[in-house]
Amino acid sequence: MQIEQTSLPGVVILTPVRHGDARGFFSESWNRQRMIEAGLDIDFVQDNHSLSARVGTIRGLHYQAPPHAQAKLVRCGKGKLFDVAVDIRKGSPTYGQWTGVELSFENGRQLLIPAGFLHGFVTLEPDTEIVYKCSDYYAPECDGGVLWSSCGIDWPFTGEPLLSDKDRKAVPLADFTSPFSFEA
Ligand SMILES: Cc1cn([C@H]2C[C@H](O)[C@@H](COP(=O)(O)OP(=O)(O)O[C@H]3O[C@H](C)C(=O)[C@H](O)[C@H]3O)O2)c(=O)[nH]c1=O
């Protein structure tokens, strides 16, 4: 498994090995022992899977607040997307900073996003599917969001995005009070 750092400490890109043969490929998309060996052991408890039919669909920027904060391991099961994490830990030297990576079925890359970061993505192909592991269960009472266009993210997409009503009405980062604090 290849591990690449990003501009945000703690947010890392993982690329599992693909074993190719005449049929296609086989890959261990997640192996807890490999994560432990890499010092990235996280006790994931829930897998999520969503389909976004239209190019330019933006889901995000979301978080779950403590006590149900979620770390996520995100990959693209079909199509292509640009995945983004934003540091919202009060007191963090990278507070409000973002990093983004293109995830696709073709490149097999995954983004590991710790708790304390917003997560969102924009789809770059039709019928794009995202699959991701979460380190806590869904807790709608802890669900929160920040407006996708308020964090200075250089989205690789022009035009009007497709958004849920919830995402369209999200609070701008400048007006946001984070429930997360940075722990050095
Ligand atoms: C997140 C979630 C949602 N749901 C239900 C609630 C709604 O009836 C429906 C759609 O939920 P929502 O509009 O919040 O889905 P997304 O906009 O894709 O939200 C997700 O997208 C961003 C990128 C994330 O990282 C989060 O996992 C999550 O916020 O699925 C569940 O039943 N379980 C869940 O864990």
Image: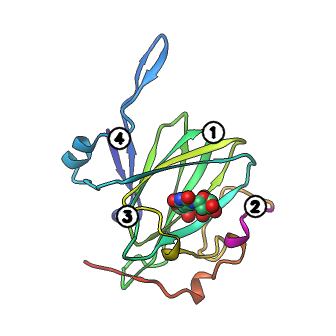
| Part of the protein shown in magenta | 160-166
Task: Write the residue at 27% across / 79% down.
Answer: 183
Mark linked to residue 79: 1
Disc with the residue nearer the chain's start (2 vs 1)? 1
Q: Secondary structure at mark 2?
A: loop
| Disc 2: which residue | 161
Residue 120 seen in render: no
Disc with the residue nearer the chain's start (3 vs 1)? 1
Measure the alpha-carbon separation of dots 4 and 3. Answer: 16 Å
Residue 66 figure quarter:
bottom left
Q: Residue placed farthest to the left in the image?
A: 37
Mark linked to residue 30: 4
Q: Secondary structure at mark 3?
A: loop
Q: Position of residue 10 (x, y in %)?
A: 34, 63
User: Quick check: 116 above or below 162?
Assistant: below
Q: Is residue 162 magenta?
A: yes
Q: Position of residue 141 (x, y in %)?
A: 51, 76
Q: Residue placed farthest to the top in the image?
A: 22
Measure the alpha-carbon separation of dots 2 and 3. Answer: 26 Å
Q: Position of residue 91 (x, y in %)?
A: 36, 85
Task: Write the residue at 47% across / 50% down.
Answer: 132
Q: Position of residue 19 (x, y in %)?
A: 38, 22
Q: How many marks?
A: 4
Tell me if 43 is positioned left or right of 106 in this view.
Answer: left
CB-based contact (under 8 Å), mark 2 and mark 3: no
Instruction: Please state which amino acid type lies under the numbered disc 4.
Output: Trp
Instruction: Please state which amino acid type lies under the numbered disc 1.
Output: Gly
Q: Secondary structure at mark 1?
A: loop
Mark linked to residue 19: none
